[in-house]
Amino acid sequence: MSVQPTPRQNDTAQDRPSWTDLVDAVREAGQYPTAAEAERVIRIVMSALGGHVIGDERVDLAHALPEEAARVVASQIPATRPLTAAEFVDSIADRIQGATPATARWDVSSVLSVLPPLLGDDLVDRILAQLPPGYALLFGRPQLMPTA
């Protein structure tokens, strides 16, 4: 199941995708056996992401997400320093009992890779511009390197 983009003109709760649609998309992407497991992973990853996206991008991110996910993002205190993509994945591994860096990367990618169709390319580009290099891959995008 894919999550449909949110129209930006009339940004109301009715325009947002449903929590169920997001859970189903993550469950399918991550091949999680239950919706409860997908929900748990969404909450952990969005909580961590919410601390690293700031300013207008954070507001726009929250507006594009289902209300449940938006509350998780908006309730986070901004991080004191940006984490590299590898450190971000490691921080997720620390939050999930029994997780390894490999399983945490799977979890992070399972959540973040379903967001681009929901958020739109412009917002994803703006979010990635705020984050250190390496996050594009977690969003299911190629990591473009600047040319010399």
Image (cartoon, rainbow, N blue to C red):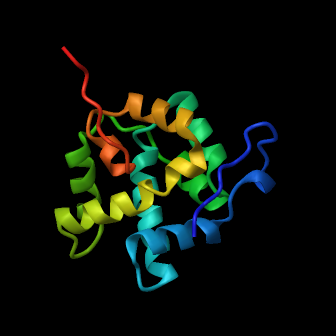
Please identify the quarter of the rendering in which residue 109 is found.
bottom left
The picture places residue 12, in percent across and down from the top left corner, at 79, 47
Q: Which of 131 and 74 lies nearest the eye of the viewer?
A: 131
The relative height of residue 55 versus residue 70 in the rendered view (above or below) is above
Q: Residue furthest top?
A: 148
Q: Quadrant of the C terminus?
A: top left
Q: Position of residue 33 (x, y in %)?
A: 42, 85
Label total for image:
0
**Which residue corresponds to the image point at 46% horizontal and 55% vertical from the top-left?**
46
Q: Position of residue 69 (x, y in %)?
A: 57, 57
For the N terminus, give its image quadrant: bottom right
As drawn, is 106 to the left or to the right of 44? left
| Residue plotted at (65% across, 56% down) | 4
**Where in the figure is residue 6, as x and y percent of width and height?**
69, 48
**Front residue of this view, candidates 29 and 78:** 29
Q: Is residue 131 above or below residue 77?
A: above
